[in-house]
């Protein structure tokens, strides 16, 4: 029983983390129709930024979170302006954009390798090992904090989309960019802001993962796949749908540990993707994400 | 138009000359260069086969190393277990690679980004599975193979013959109805489907062929180096190398990827030797630059050069007349 509870809590926590990663990928896809293959690299960048802030400057990872978000936002805007916006029009959805962003990922990985070497890192705080008693089991304080933040992210996104003008403009551009130009929305600006926000979400997810797992320059490949699974599963329709999809992926992964050897866990997400594509190609809620 | 016959003759002469040089190469070249040349020939076959999917059908695979690895390990195990002649084991490895490619069938009904990300997943998953499946792959310590009759020289000729075969197949596919249908899928799946093209079936067929070619080269590679290990065969770097060879040579061009393979193998030898810590990033930068400025890679550059030359020629001709 205690083990089941433990696994359920782990799943909830991982689910929150996966949702945060997936929002970044899904947002950029939803508005720009570009699958950001550099997303894994962005997550890795967020992890290293958090690590530098903590190890070198002594800033607690949770205080460093806004800094990481802002830096990653800037990185996203630069990436969009410098690279993606230069893609020939019409090539945005196809192979060229995939290859381009894949190239960006390789560059990010190499930079991380040059600066931080290939050694595995982890953010270890003074409270990393502390935990609270809860219903006969113990919950790690750090994990609770990660969960708390990953619950705040969807709330913030929901507010952004429903209340702010920027959010409304983003939704409008996602529906019909041409009409937006007609009513005076600066579509290019919305694109670059969206790319920035998506990248910031990736960075936040990276920082949160870094407090839980060891990472290196190659970190992020599995995370890209997981984000993608969640986006396909949950569709782009709602913030809540993505969260539920992330929870499902996390539950399947966590409970697969009971049945499968640990080294196969990374393949679970992929198998889930295949199963979903075969059984419900339109995602759980029937909205087809990609053409 | 006027100069076409001359150009065709020049091309033919260059081809014959090149082939003669390649046939004589083992007698002239030293071991190191011959190694490089064989590797290049193998990678040419891979790049061309990758381009069938990535260029013709427009489905970019980031996981072709999976088929390369499966082919290599199946061939290796087969020759260790049964002692069959090497070419048969390569063929079986190729069949295994082709069959393995079809595992991806469910995701292949979907195209574009779905396909690409799924291939990253397949590549990673197969690397993990084969690394941990020590009974088959020897784990991190790999598998050593018996030497092939005729030694490295014979393998060089096999690699040369196979590369020529794959090159001829590329030309054939590109000119066939099948090739046209693939291009139609790449440009607009829905329009292609309306015109009666069965996109799923064609893509499956192409991926299977592409996987089979890559599987065979996996077997050849294993025999040539007489040692393979999963992290090299299935590595992410290897999948990336196929992508790069295709993109450098010219995504979707018929024979460009072969040139891309040549450039890639030579440059990676130089880069790996002098800047091992930089090469991934350099390839990333290269990828970005090519996609932004010359999406057709070397083929595009060549065409541009040819156009400029023609224009200069025409201008001279006009100048002479007046």
Image (spheres, rainbow, N blue to C red):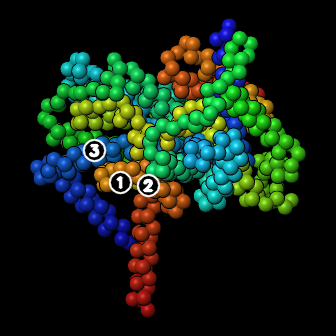
Q: CB atoms at circles 1 and 2 under 8 Å apart? A: yes
* Residue B321, placed above or below residue B233: below
Depth check, front residue: A9 or B157: A9
Q: Which residue is at a point 39% across and 50% down the rendered structure image?
A: B277
- For the residue carrying disc 2, how many other residues have a C-alpha within 10 Å: few (<14), some (14-19), or many (20+)? some
- Residue under pointer 3: B39
> Could you tell me which quadrant the C terminus of chain A lies in?
top right
Mark 3 residue crowding within 10 angstroms, few (<14) / some (14–19) / many (20+): many
Q: Residue at x 51, y 38 (%)?
A: A121
Q: Which residue is mark 2?
A: B282
Work out whether residue A65 or residue B280 is closer to the camera in this orientation and state it. Answer: A65
Q: Are marks 1 and 2 on the same chain?
A: yes
**Residue A24 appears in which quarter of the rendering?**
top right
Total of numbered circles in the picture? Answer: 3
Q: Is residue B225 visible?
A: yes
Residue B125's x, y, as percent?
48, 28
Q: CA distance from mark 1 to mark 3?
A: 20 Å
Whether residue B194 is visible here, answered yes or no, is no
Say what secondary structure mark 1 lies in.
loop
Residue located farthest toward the left when viewing the structure as drawn? B27
Q: Nearer the viewer, residue A284 or B318?
A: A284
Near-viewer residue (A56 or B120): A56
Q: Nearer the viewer, mark 1 or mark 2?
A: 1
Q: Residue B253 vs residue A65: left or right?
A: left
Q: Is A141 displayed left or right of B45 in the figure?
A: right
Which is nearer the N-term, disc 1 or disc 3? 3
Residue at numbered disc 1: B275
Task: Give the x, y percent position of residue B212.
Answer: 38, 32
């Amino acid at each position: 029983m205690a083990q089941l509870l433990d696994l359920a809590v782990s799943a909830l926590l991982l689910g929150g983390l996966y949702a945060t990663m997936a929002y970044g990928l899904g947002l950029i896809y939803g508005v720009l129709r570009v699958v950001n293959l550099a997303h894994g690299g962005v997550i890795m960048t967020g992890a290293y930024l958090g690590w530098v802030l903590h190890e070198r400057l002594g800033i607690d990872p949770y205080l460093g979170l806004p800094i990481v978000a802002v830096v990653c936002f800037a990185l996203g805007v630069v990436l969009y302006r410098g690279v993606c916006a230069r893609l020939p029009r019409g090539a945005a959805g196809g192979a060229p954009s995939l290859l381009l962003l894949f190239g960006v990922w390789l560059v990010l990985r190499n930079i991380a390798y040059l600066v931080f070497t290939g050694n595995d890192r982890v953010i270890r705080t003074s409270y990393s090992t502390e935990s609270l008693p809860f219903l006969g089991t113990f919950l790690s304080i750090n994990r609770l904090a990660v969960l708390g933040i990953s619950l705040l992210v969807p709330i913030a996104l929901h507010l952004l989309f429903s209340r702010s003008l920027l959010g409304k403009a983003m939704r409008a551009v996602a529906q019909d960019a041409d009409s937006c130009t007609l009513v005076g929305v600066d579509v290019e600006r919305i694109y670059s802001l969206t790319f920035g926000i998506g990248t910031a979400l990736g960075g936040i997810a990276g920082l949160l993962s870094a407090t839980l797992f060891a990472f290196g320059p190659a970190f992020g490949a599995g995370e890209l796949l997981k984000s993608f699974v969640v986006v396909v599963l949950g569709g782009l329709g709602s913030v809540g749908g993505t969260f539920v999809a992330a929870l499902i992926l996390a539950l399947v992964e966590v409970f697969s540990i009971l049945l499968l050897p640990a080294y196969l866990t990374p393949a679970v997400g992929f198998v889930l993707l295949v199963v979903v594509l075969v059984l419900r190609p339109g995602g759980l809620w029937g909205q087809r994400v990609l053409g | 138009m006027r100069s076409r016959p001359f150009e065709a003759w020049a091309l033919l002469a260059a081809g014959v000359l090149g082939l003669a040089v390649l046939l004589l190469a083992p007698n002239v070249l030293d071991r190191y260069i011959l190694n490089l040349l064989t590797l290049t020939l193998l990678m040419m076959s891979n790049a061309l086969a990758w381009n069938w999917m990535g260029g013709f059908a427009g489905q970019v695979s980031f996981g072709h190393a999976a088929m390369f690895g499966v082919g290599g390990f199946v061939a290796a195990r087969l020759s260790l277990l049964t002692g069959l002649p090497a070419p048969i084991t390569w063929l079986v490895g190729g069949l295994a690679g082709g069959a393995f490619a079809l595992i991806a069938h469910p995701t292949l009904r979907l195209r574009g980004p779905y396909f690409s990300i799924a291939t990253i997943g397949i590549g990673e998953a197969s690397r993990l599975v084969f690394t941990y499946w020590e009974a088959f792959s020897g784990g991190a310590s790999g598998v050593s193979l018996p030497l092939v009759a005729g030694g490295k020289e014979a393998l060089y000729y096999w690699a040369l013959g196979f590369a020529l075969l794959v090159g001829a197949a590329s030309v054939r596919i590109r000119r066939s109805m099948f090739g046209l249908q693939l291009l139609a899928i790449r440009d607009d799946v829905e329009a292609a489907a309306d015109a009666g093209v069965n996109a799923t079936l064609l893509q499956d067929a192409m991926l299977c062929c592409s996987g089979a070619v890559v599987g065979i080269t996996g077997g050849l590679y294993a025999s040539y180096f007489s040692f393979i290990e999963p992290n090299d065969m299935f590595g992410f770097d290897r999948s990336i190398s196929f992508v790069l060879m295709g993109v450098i040579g010219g995504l979707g061009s018929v024979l460009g990827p072969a040139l891309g393979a040549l450039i890639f193998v030579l440059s990676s030898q130089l880069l790996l030797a002098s800047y091992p810590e930089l090469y991934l990033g350099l390839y990333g930068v290269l990828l970005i630059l090519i996609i932004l400025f010359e999406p057709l890679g070397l083929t595009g550059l060549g065409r541009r050069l040819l156009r400029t030359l023609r224009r200069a020629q025409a201008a001279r001709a006009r100048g002479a007349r007046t």
